[in-house]
Image (spheres, helix red, strand yellow):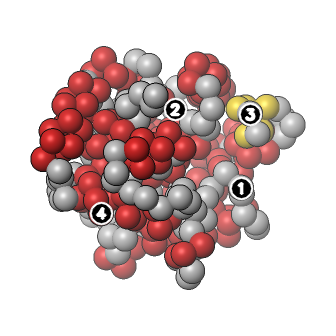
């Protein structure tokens, strides 16, 4: 176990560097300074972060160019209402999906989710509603509010199934956005939220991370779902209970034979 921890720690140190940013989707929220812009960009870019990496970066760049200097202003002004619903933004994410996200985000910023001394309403409030620090429940709150604002669900916002967790999705892209927003070691992740802690986070699980984790003996469960995310994160907490998700930088970088 010590040897495995040492191996993973070395990979984290190798990959969690400023040089990592330029070739990863996390580069996009780094372009902004306003907290609300960073939140919107994190969720949107994470949502289209699947498939060929070069395509992800190109399409994310085009999407944000369409939104202008301030994605928050674009969302709140309703600029998205003019989007061609049939326009392909990224693979199966179309203009209608971007409109869904923007409409939902506008509603989330307009309705206060808690009383804040600075009179600003930020999306973190949704994830810590009523003192909650369960990120699965936070994702469910986010999904439910987006559904309420749009009058229906979106296949691009995964379902954690908090009522029936055994049926829950891994929610990989949402957990990746949360990693960007919560982890704050001053290197890759932005860490603009401070009510959720790195210890609250769950590992963003995709096919590659799951295969690597099985090859390393971290998990043996075959399904890539919520239960597997919880099992893997709990295992990683044995290596670092305060920041288990830092090992995302290790697991994604392992080359499979």
Task: Answer whether labels 4 and 2 touch (C-beta < 8 Å).
Answer: no
Q: Residues within 10 Å of mark 3 (few under 14, many from 20)?
A: few
- According to the picture, the residue beneath numbered tag 2 turns out to be 70
- Between tags 4 and 2, which lies in front? 4
Task: Answer whether labels 1 and 3 touch (C-beta < 8 Å).
Answer: no
Q: Residues within 10 Å of mark 2 (few under 14, many from 20)?
A: some
Residue 232 placement (x, y as % from top left): 36, 58
- According to the picture, the residue beneath numbered tag 1 turns out to be 155
Q: Nearer the viewer, residue 201 or 13?
A: 13
What number is the disc on residue 27?
none
Q: Nearer the viewer, residue 46 or 121?
A: 46
The residue drawn where x is 39% and y is 57% is 219
**Label 1 – label 3 distance at C-alpha:** 13 Å
Q: Tag 2, which secondary structure?
A: loop
Residue 39 placement (x, y as % from top left): 45, 45
- Between tags 4 and 3, which lies in front? 4
Residue 230 placement (x, y as % from top left): 39, 64
**Nearest to N terminus: mark 4 or mark 2:** 2
Q: Residues within 10 Å of mark 4 (few under 14, many from 20)?
A: some
**Nearest to N terminus: mark 1 or mark 3:** 3
Task: Answer whether labels 1 and 2 touch (C-beta < 8 Å).
Answer: no
**Label 4 – label 1 distance at C-alpha:** 28 Å
**Label 4 – label 2 distance at C-alpha:** 38 Å
Residue 164 placement (x, y as % from top left): 57, 80
Q: Is residue 7 left or right of residue 72?
A: left
Q: Tag 1, which secondary structure?
A: loop
What number is the disc on residue 91?
3
- According to the picture, the residue beneath numbered tag 4 turns out to be 234
**Nearest to N terminus: mark 2 or mark 3:** 2
């Amino acid at each position: 176990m010590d040897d495995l921890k040492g191996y993973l720690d070395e990979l984290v140190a190798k990959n969690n560097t400023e040089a990592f940013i330029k070739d990863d989707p996390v580069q996009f929220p780094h372009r902004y300074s306003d907290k609300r812009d960073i939140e919107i960009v994190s969720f949107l870019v994470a949502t289209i972060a699947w498939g060929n990496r070069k395509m992800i970066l190109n399409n994310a760049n085009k999407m944000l160019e369409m939104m202008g200097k301030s994605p928050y202003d674009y969302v709140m002004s309703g600029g998205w209402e003019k989007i061609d619903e049939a326009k392909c933004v990224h693979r199966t994410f179309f203009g209608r999906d971007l409109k869904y996200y923007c409409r939902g985000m506008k509603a989330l910023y307009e309705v206060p989710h808690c009383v804040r001394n600075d009179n600003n309403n930020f999306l973190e409030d949704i994830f810590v509603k009523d003192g909650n620090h369960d990120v699965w429940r936070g994702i469910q709150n986010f999904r439910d509010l987006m559904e309420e604002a749009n009058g229906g669900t979106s296949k691009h916002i995964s379902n954690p199934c908090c009522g029936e967790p055994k049926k829950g999705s891994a929610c990989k892209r949402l957990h990746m956005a949360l990693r960007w927003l919560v982890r704050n070691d001053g290197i890759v992740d932005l860490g603009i939220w401070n009510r959720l802690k790195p210890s609250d986070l769950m590992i963003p699980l995709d096919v590659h991370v799951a295969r690597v984790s099985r090859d390393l003996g971290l998990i043996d469960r075959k399904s890539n779902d919520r239960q597997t995310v919880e099992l893997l994160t709990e295992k990683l907490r044995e290596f670092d209970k305060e920041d288990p998700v830092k090992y995302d930088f290790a697991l994604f970088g392992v080359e499979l034979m």
